[in-house]
Amino acid sequence: MREDTVSEVNLQGIYLSHRDRVSVRRFSPREESHAGADWEWWFHVGGRGFGLRVQAKRASRDNSYPLRHKVGGRLQNDLLIEDAVAAGCLPMYVLYNHDKRLPQMPSAGCAHSPDTPRLRGCSIVSGLTVRRALADEARPHVYTRKHSIPWNEIVCGDDTDGSLLELVHDRVRELHWKGLGQVADLPEDRLQWGERPGGLDQSLSKFVTGATLDSTRSADLLEDRRLRELARIAARPTRSRLPGRVLEMIDRPEAEAPDARITHTVIVNLAPGRG
């Protein structure tokens, strides 16, 4: 199946299983859906929350992903990051993996689901991790997959105390901070999933403000305004006000797509006591 077909099946499956929390808006793309992103994913409580811009990639029979795909002579990854900045979202890839050839990947630990190979069929990773892989790696799919996590783990938590939105934001932001650190060539032992290693936050806070990073690539990084803007987006409070277009989609199912390349908008209500 094509990536867009797999996405359609998965998103509808999530909706049918969690329709008390999840709404899915499907749009007819006016441009090739693979030009930049496939869908936007918003998590909210009331009128506040955060968003992701998602590009899906399906593993081929040799377990690689078409990460070097170009549109109009430009890398799709560049378009994804560009679109994410414009939309105020964090850029993410969702990877569709083969059931019989699932590679090992890190786990954040999920108390609600056993750590079985089946749950690794869909994983998520920062678009900046992919950017790092494309810059230096001969086999970017290996590096990308190694740093992805099963996507169910970003929403694994307890909503009884009303902090599920913060928990999901922290887990997504951890992937994004990790991607920023990888682009900045920070050592692997400072990029572990599930914790903020000493010095990582401090280095990235310098990155946000435009100060010099202790990195061989700091000069190149600081010239890239999009990366600095993505760092600022990640640093926003969890309960930032949603854009007007997202609030409109929450209230009106017939709302228009945010732009020509989006096929779906998925809106997840993380208010306590729902589901």
Image: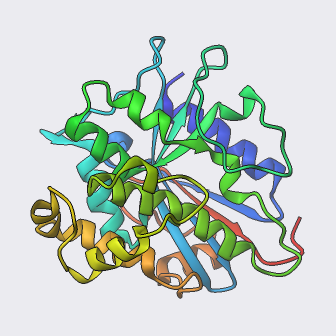
Q: How is the image coloured?
A: rainbow
Of residue 89 and residue 187, the one placed in the foreground of this image is 187
Picture coordinates of residue 176 (x, y %)? 44, 60
One can see residue 259 in this view: yes
Looking at the figure, which quarter contains the N terminus? Answer: top right
Residue 265, placed above or below residue 207: above
Would you identify the image quadrant in which residue 33 lies? top left
Looking at the figure, which quarter contains the C terminus? Answer: bottom right
Q: Residue at x 35, y 40 (%)?
A: 34
Residue 30, placed above or below residue 83: above
Q: Residue at x 66, y 44 (%)?
A: 107
Would you identify the image quadrant in which residue 225 lies? bottom left
Picture coordinates of residue 219 (x, y %)? 9, 65
**Left or right of 142 on screen, residue 72:** left
**Left or right of 43 on screen, residue 255:** left
Picture coordinates of residue 268 (x, y %)? 68, 65
Q: Residue at x 20, y 60 (%)?
A: 215
Would you identify the image quadrant in which residue 228 lies? bottom left
Q: Residue at x 12, y 38 (%)?
A: 73
One can see residue 54 in this view: no
**Left or right of 166 on screen, residue 50:** left
Of residue 111 and residue 199, the one placed in the foreground of this image is 199
Count of marks overlaid on the render: 0
Picture coordinates of residue 180 (x, y %)? 34, 60
